[in-house]
Each structure stands twice: as structure tokens, then as C-alpha cells.
């Protein structure tokens, strides 16, 4: 999962939403990971508008952060992201987020409203993430159960991407982020049929 800075995206969306646009996720060891926006103009072939890098990305193929967590590998690749139409680029508010979900080469671009929680509710959500990883996953006894777990865990990760808490302490935010990242890493090694990905 990759999060992007709302201020950068809001400016781009405000200026370009009425044009036909495309969004590509670029993964390159030399240049890092970023979204590339392009616009189809009269007599032109998709001039590049902007590159927007994920929040917190530090760059480089040996970086221990985003690249390692999402198992991108070492080679250059470009992934077209479906937006569902020009409406996707309407003005972005501070109450919304744009997130890229995906692992192992299949990526989705999702825009959605932030669900603001109280500190107590954020802690409960952190516990749900931890239970999914430490209780429900070990309880799966075959591929069928793991396949069901994969769907539930993926849905929970997507829900977590749009969770926010304005009054949370740094430690609460850190625990939430850690729980979400740990669950993502586990989901990354499970295939949709419930079998475990063999890492050579």
C-alpha cells in the first residue's frame, strides 16, 4: 500500500480534472517509486504532467521501506492504474485519500473518504489488525481457510488505509502503522488460493 500527499494531489486534480488523464505507477530502482500523471492534449500524445512520490519513501532499490515491504523486485516496471473516469480527478478535499493497493504486480488506485476515529476506536482497530495476523491466520488449517482469510485480511487492510485519528498520540499512530504493515507483509506471502508463496 502506498499513500500520497494530499496537498500535491489536490493541486494536480484541481488543475487537470476536466482533461482526459491517465495514471501510471512507475517502479524503477534508479528513480524510485512514483505515480506519473499524463494528459491527452490536442495534437499531443500524453505529455507528462507530474510525478508524485509516496509519503515516507526514501528512495533506492536497497531501501528497507516501501520497496522491500511491497516486494517490487529490482527491475523497472510500469503499471497502468484504472481511475474509472475523469470524475476521479475532481477536487480532492482534506477529508479524502488516494491510495495504491497491490502486491506482486497487480495494483489498484483507490480514492475514498477518511474515517475519523476516536483514540479508543483507533486502538480497537489496531487490535483487530493484530488479531487477524496473530490469531486468525494461525488458526487456518488448509488452503481453503487461508483463501477466506486472505480476502478478510485484504479487506481489513483496505479499510485501515482510510482510517484517521486527529487526537492520537505518536505511540498510538506508530502501533497502528506497525500492525497494518505487519498484516500487509503476511498477506503478501499468501496467494489468493490460500497456498503460501515460496520465496527462493
Image (cartoon, rainbow, N blue to C red):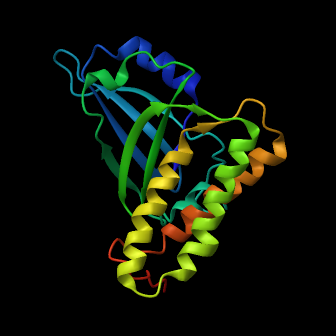
Residue name at image x 75 percent, y 54 percent:
175
Q: Is residue 13 above or below residue 199?
A: above
Q: Is residue 32 above or below residue 119?
A: below
Task: Give the percent coordinates (x, y) of residue 84.
Answer: 25, 33
Asked if residue 194 lies left or right of residue 125, the reply is left
Task: Give the percent coordinates (x, y) of residue 185.
Answer: 56, 67
Task: Give the percent coordinates (x, y) of residue 60.
Answer: 61, 55
Q: Quadrant of residue 119?
A: top right
Residue name at image x 20 percent, y 21 percent:
44
Q: How many marks?
A: 0
Which of the two residues, 71 or 84, is positioned nearer the viewer here?
Answer: 84
Residue name at image x 44 percent, y 74 percent:
190
Q: Is residue 70 above or below residue 24?
A: below
Q: Is residue 200 above or below residue 12?
A: below
Task: Give the percent coordinates (x, y) of residue 106.
Answer: 34, 57
Asked if residue 31 lies left or right of residue 180, the reply is left
Q: Quadrant of residue 53?
A: top right
Q: Quadrant of residue 86?
A: top left
Which of the two residues, 169 or 22, is positioned nearer the viewer here?
Answer: 169
Residue name at image x 66 percent, y 43 percent:
56
**Residue found at the far left of this picture:** 43
Amino acid at each position: 500500500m502506498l499513500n500520497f500527499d494530499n496537498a500535491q494531489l489536490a493541486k494536480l486534480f484541481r488543475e487537470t480534472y476536466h482533461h482526459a488523464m491517465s495514471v501510471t505507477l512507475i517502479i524503477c530502482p534508479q528513480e524510485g517509486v512514483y505515480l506519473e500523471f499524463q494528459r491527452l492534449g490536442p495534437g499531443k500524445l500524453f505529455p507528462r504532467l507530474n510525478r508524485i512520490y509516496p509519503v515516507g519513501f526514501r528512495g533506492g532499490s536497497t531501501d528497507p521501506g516501501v520497496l522491500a515491504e511491497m516486494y517490487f523486485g529490482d527491475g523497472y516496471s510500469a503499471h497502468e492504474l484504472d481511475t474509472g473516469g475523469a470524475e476521479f480527478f475532481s477536487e480532492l478535499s482534506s477529508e479524502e485519500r488516494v491510495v495504491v493497493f497491490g502486491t506482486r504486480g497487480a495494483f489498484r488506485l483507490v480514492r475514498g473518504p477518511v474515517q475519523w476515529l476516536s483514540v479508543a476506536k483507533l486502538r480497537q482497530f489496531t487490535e483487530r489488525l493484530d488479531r487477524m495476523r496473530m490469531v486468525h491466520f494461525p488458526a487456518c488449517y488448509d488452503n481453503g481457510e487461508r483463501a477466506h482469510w486472505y480476502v478478510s485480511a485484504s479487506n481489513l487492510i483496505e479499510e485501515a488505509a482510510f482510517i484517521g485519528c486527529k487526537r492520537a498520540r505518536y505511540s498510538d499512530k506508530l502501533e497502528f502503522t506497525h500492525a497494518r504493515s505487519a498484516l500487509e507483509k503476511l498477506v503478501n506471502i499468501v496467494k489468493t488460493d490460500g497456498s503460501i508463496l515460496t520465496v527462493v
